[in-house]
Amino acid sequence: MMEAPIPVDDGARVASLRSMNLIATPAEPALDGITRLARRLAKAPMALVSVVDAERQWFLSRVGMEASEAPRRTSFCGHAIVQEEPFVIPDARLDVRFADNPVVTGPPFVRSYAGIPLRNGDGHAIGTLCVIDTRPRQFMDSVLDALTDLARLAEIGLENRRLGETQRQLVAELDEARREALLCPLTQAWNRRGFDLLYQREAAKAAREGVPLGLAVLDIDHFKRINDTHGHETGDRAIRLFAEILRGSLRPYDTLCRIGGEEFVALLPGVTETGLEAIGHKLLTAVRSQGLLPVDEHAPPPHRFTTSIGMVTVALAAAAGAAAQALALRRADEALYRAKSDGRDRLDLAPPVEG
């Protein structure tokens, strides 16, 4: 196996990448749309937007790929970033650089690859938009042209990330290792520890700005049935898809966290009770229409799932503090269970938490 080459300006390249605070951060909905479109255009099972650091590549968005990162030395993208043109491998088993690569000889059994380098505002190649197939194939010029156009959109997305102010501040304050400890590797949403930190910051911000804070607790209806019928790997795919749907349906400055199992919580700053209900119905509709989980590629149709939601607003005077957080979460949880008792695929609004 030939390890990924190191560009002569790699120190400057890595420093420029790290200044963008992209590694070990939540997934970006705009990039998710690009990877989904890239996979459809290329008719390939996997697509990634990845950035290549000094020792690893971090997947900012992925479809069809289980892992959230990979070693740089074995990465195809590490080879692609030193190219000016699309980097294409029609059959990795016949290429001396990759024939004995562990991702070729083992899962996910890469056979063909097409990667478009992504450059940042400093002109450095920081990563790739790539599509990956498990069968040998040629990529038509029209497909490579379309991927190149999508790569330009991905570059814009990387330069203009839409994380809310509170999340941006937290990302800027913490190094990569501490940020990574606050992320769920399965979904690239914030984890429970991340939720605890971000709730207090959003509550303090709401108090400064004189606005309420909304909270939504959501989970997948009949999730145990998915695990019992189709297995835990399919259950994990359901959780990843659920997170992707929620991320794409929330406002850019909302915060999505996975707090356990199939349960998520969304922090919704500045939302009134009326606005909270509107967001809830939008989420219900999105999951209802997009919650289609392939369970066997040879036996359609896919499994359809829905969600139930418990929601609450936290008034300005009561927002901050661990007690307010616990009360808000408990009321939203109680509302979630009422929604389930009433038949699922619906929302329930809890009484506001007031000072």
Image: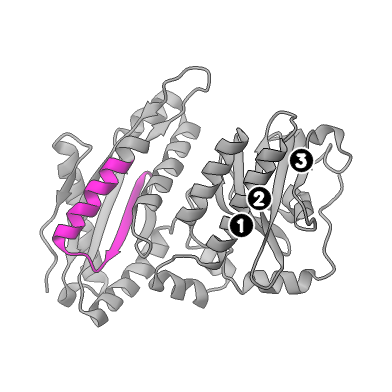
Packing grade of label 2 (10 A; few <14, some 14-19, many >=20) is many
Distance (Cα) linking label 2 and label 1: 6 Å
Residue 55 part of the magenta segment: no
Q: Which residue is drawn at 43% across and 31% down?
A: 293
Magenta region includes residue 273: yes
Which residue appears farthest toward the top when viewing the image? 299
Q: Which amino acid is tagged 1?
A: Arg
> Which amino acid is tagged 3?
Pro
User: How far across and down, in percent of the image, does residue 209 sit?
Assistant: 25, 80
Residue at position x 58%, y 67% from top? 177
Picture disc at residue 148: 2
Kind of element beneath mark 2: helix
* 2 sits to left or right of 73: right
284 vs 134: above or below: below
Residue 29 visible in the shown view: yes
Discs 2, 1 touching: Cβ within 8 Å: yes
**Which amino acid lies under the numbered mark 2 shown in the image of this protein?**
Thr
**Residue 178 or residue 280, whichever sits in front:** 280
Q: Name the residue under label 1.
A: 152
Tell me the quarter of the image containing the N terminus.
top right
- Mark 3 surroundings within 10 Å by alpha-carbon count, few (fewer than 14), some (14 through 19), many (20 or more): some
Q: Which of 330 and 170 is in front in this view?
A: 170
Disc nearest the viewer among 3 and 2: 2
What element does badge 3 sit on?
A: helix
- Front one among 174 and 250: 250
Q: Distance between the residues labelled 3 and 1?
A: 30 Å
